[in-house]
Image: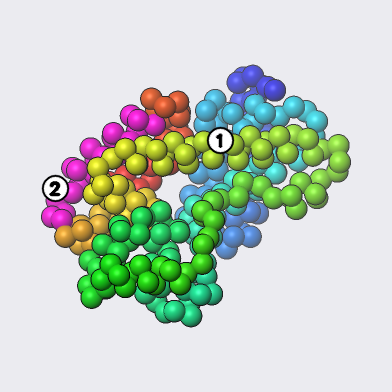
Amino acid sequence: MLDRHQAERLFLENLGWIERVLGTLARRQGLSGDDADDFASWAKLRLIEDDYSALRRFRGESAPATYLTVVLTMLARDYRVRERGRWRPSAAARRLGPTAVRLETLVHRDGFTLTQAAQLMRTTGHGELADRDVAELWRQLPARPPLRPVAASDEVVATLPAGEQADVRVLAQESEQRRSEAEQAVARAVASLPDEDQVIVRMRVWHEMTVADVARGLNLPQKPLYRRMDRIFSQLRRTLEAGGLSRERVRGLLEDRAP
């Protein structure tokens, strides 16, 4: 593994290559202009966060350009999931109609409990939906695994020569482990909040609702909600940092959706 100064030198010496690869990846995702610039900035920040942790894992068992290309490809996939998600409603939900799709999405994609999802649906256009109706609808939907981003796929590794795969596999495994640990830490931190605060965080972070939409959905005054959300997110940041997550990692998990 590299030390911080070696990783920084690897980043700076290959910055031109990194930017060309990011440009190619942006075009493949249909990004241009400001969107492409946002992606490139996000990806370079991920490379340097935690004292260049992604680059410090380079062992020299592959060419630097190969390693960087695979790291950036992994980041591009993470960015696509972060921005667009990978959620698709089940065939059963589509057959049952929009209400079933909405319920399945709130629970399986956004992480609400069934009770929270029912409450949210009643305050956002399904006021006639009783708890027994929600329970019956839920009974007809299939069980689904949690939605989780994919850090890297075997098809990316398979395109490399055999001698260049070790670095990439180690990075993918460690990236997945860190992501899983971060997701569990966030879930625990959110679960420690009062019930309504949990709903607010899930609506804002997982469901990507605006503060105005959260206020309307929960029938709360909007102006005080900004202050309340600021307190909630500050508490989450402190909890996550106390649990061992870096400030940069916490920023990536929460601050894009903080008020």
Q: Residue 224 bears which disc, if any? A: 2
Q: Is residue 175 above or below residue 127?
A: above
Is the stretch drawn in magenta largely helix, strand or loop? helix
The amino acid on which the numbered mark 1 sits, given as a three-letter code, is: Arg
- Residue 61: percent from left, percent from top: 80, 30
- The quarter holding residue 128 reads bottom left
- The quarter holding residue 164 reads top right
Q: Secondary structure at mark 2?
A: helix
Residue 139 falls within the magenta-colored stretch: no
Residue drawn at 35 percent across, 59 percent down: 114
Q: Residue 178 bears which disc, if any? A: 1
- The reply to whether callout 1 and callout 2 are in contact (CB within 8 Å) is no
Using a 10 Å C-alpha cutoff, classify the residue at mark 2 as few (fewer than 14 neighbours), some (14 to 19) or many (20 or more): few
Magenta residues, start to end: 220-240
Q: Which marked residue is nearer to the observer: mark 1 or mark 2?
A: 1
Q: Nearer the viewer, residue 83 or 36?
A: 83
Estimate the spatial distance between the alpha carbons at disc 1 and disc 2, rounded to whole Å.
Answer: 35 Å
- Residue 247: percent from left, percent from top: 42, 29
The amino acid on which the numbered mark 2 sits, given as a three-letter code, is: Pro
Residue 243 seen in render: yes
As drawn, is 108 to the left or to the right of 56? left
